[in-house]
């Protein structure tokens, strides 16, 4: 329906409006997720002095080594890490909103089909 533009296949105007709004929400949240992901990915160099990864070339097994004591003493590290937590909180919020709206519109469509 989206590619053809024929939302007229759904007779209930409220459901059509809700589908358009849901699509707009998905597009908006996708942009937010991309920006948050870029922020987190681009700013992870502060982890390098406390988290090391080793790869076994024979098995490709990855082992991580953490310096938790060093992390706990470093106020800059704690601040940077807390920013990641804020971003993940935003991801959780938007994901739960999408799930709630998807359930609502699914129920509307099921009711309309009956």
Image (cartoon, rainbow, N blue to C red):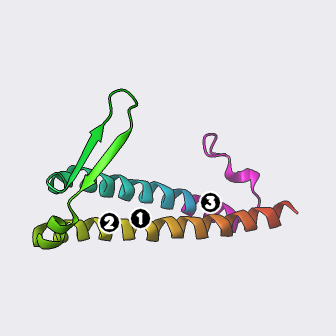
* Residue at x 14% of width, y 65% of height: 70
- Mark pair 2, 3: CA separation: 27 Å
Who is closer to the viewer here, 41 or 114? Answer: 41
- Does residue 58 show up? yes
Left or right, 54 with respect to 5, comes to: left
> Contact (CB < 8 A) between labels 2 and 1?
yes
Residue to which mark 3 is pinned: 19
Give the residue number, with chain letter if any, for mark 1. Answer: 91
Q: Is residue 44 magenta?
A: no
Along the line of sight, the residue nearer the viewer: 39 or 45: 45
Q: Is residue 106 above or below residue 43?
A: below
Q: Secondary structure at mark 2?
A: helix
State which quadrant residue 98 falls in. Answer: bottom right
Camera-side mark, 2 or 3: 2
Above or below, comparing residue 63 to residue 94 in the picture: above
Count of number-bearing discs: 3
Instruction: Find disc 2 in the rendering and name its residue.
Output: 87
Which is more N-terminal, label 3 or label 1?
Answer: 3
Q: Residue at x 17, y 51 (%)?
A: 48
Label 3 Cα neighbours within 10 Å, binned few <14 / some 14-19 / many ≥20: many
Q: Viewer-proximal residue, 49 or 2?
A: 49
Identify the residue at horizontal 31%, vertical 36% (top origin): 55
């Amino acid at each position: 329906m989206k590619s053809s533009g024929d939302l007229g296949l759904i007779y209930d105007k409220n459901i059509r409006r809700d589908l358009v709004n849901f699509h707009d929400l998905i597009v908006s949240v996708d942009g937010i997720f991309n920006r948050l992901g870029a922020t987190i990915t681009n700013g992870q160099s502060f982890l390098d002095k406390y988290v090391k990864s080793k790869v076994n070339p024979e098995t490709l097994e990855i082992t991580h080594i953490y310096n938790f004591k060093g992390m706990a003493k470093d106020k800059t590290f704690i601040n940077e890490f807390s920013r990641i937590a804020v971003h993940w909180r935003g991801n959780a919020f938007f994901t739960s909103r999408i799930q709630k709206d998807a359930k609502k519109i699914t129920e509307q469509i099921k009711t309309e089909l009956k």
